[in-house]
Image (cartoon, grey):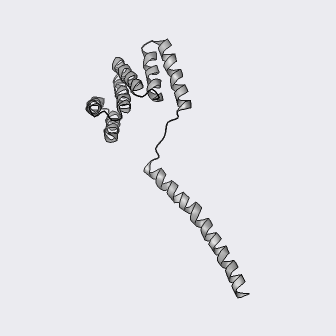
């Protein structure tokens, strides 16, 4: 499922949103991460300028996952572009509240994970080496004095 989402994003960046839409519509059949797929569909439709379908995608995403702050936000943006100001303000406020109460969990990239492991090793290994050196020094002092 994540592969389909990433591939759809790549197609959007390559200015081929129609192919991305077809890919995500196929992914919807599997039912996994449905809110995320609907959200991405909304993004693709929005990029094509198809506001009614973008609205439908975002609305369905919010129905699947009521805590999906980005879907609420984007739905508010679509409503604003359609001239539905009251609904837009309501959705944008709801998105802000959701973001405060349920912040997004950001998955670090493999490079970030590697960098964190390297830093953690340094933060643990060097102090242990210094402590070991001190203990060894004290042992030698006690043993040979």
* Residue furthest out toward the bottom: 144
Q: Nearer the viewer, residue 46 or 39?
A: 39
Residue 50: x %, y % from top left: 34, 20
Residue 129: x %, y % from top left: 60, 70
Q: Is residue 139 above or below residue 115?
A: below
Residue 26, quarter of the rendered image = top left
Q: Quadrant of the image for the C terminus?
A: bottom right
Relative to 145, 101 lies left or right: left
Q: In this view, does 100 lie above or below 141?
A: above
At x 70%, y 78%, the residue is: 138
Q: Quadrant of the image for the N terminus?
A: top left
Residue 45: x %, y % from top left: 34, 24
- Mark count: 0
Q: Nearer the viewer, residue 130 or 35?
A: 35
Residue 28, quarter of the rendered image = top left
Residue 32, quarter of the rendered image = top left
At x 43%, y 21%, the residue is: 75
* Residue furthest out toward the right: 145
Relative to 85, 57 lies left or right: left
At x 45%, y 12%, the residue is: 84
At x 38%, y 29%, the residue is: 39
Q: Is residue 115 above or below residue 34?
A: below
Residue 2: x %, y % from top left: 34, 40
């Amino acid at each position: 499922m994540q592969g389909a989402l990433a591939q759809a994003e790549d197609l959007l960046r390559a200015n081929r949103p129609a192919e991305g839409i077809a890919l995500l519509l196929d992914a919807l059949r599997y039912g996994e991460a449905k809110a995320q797929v609907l959200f991405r569909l909304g993004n693709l439709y929005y990029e094509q300028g198809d506001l009614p379908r973008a609205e439908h995608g975002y609305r369905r995403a919010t129905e699947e996952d009521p805590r999906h702050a980005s879907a609420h936000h984007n739905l508010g943006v679509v409503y604003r572009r359609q001239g539905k100001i009251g609904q837009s303000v309501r959705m944008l406020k709801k998105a802000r509240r959701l973001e405060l109460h349920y912040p997004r969990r950001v998955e670090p990239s493999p490079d970030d994970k590697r960098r964190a492991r390297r830093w953690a090793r340094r933060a643990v290994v060097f102090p242990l080496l210094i402590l070991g050196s001190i203990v060894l020094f004290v042992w030698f002092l006690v043993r040979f004095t």
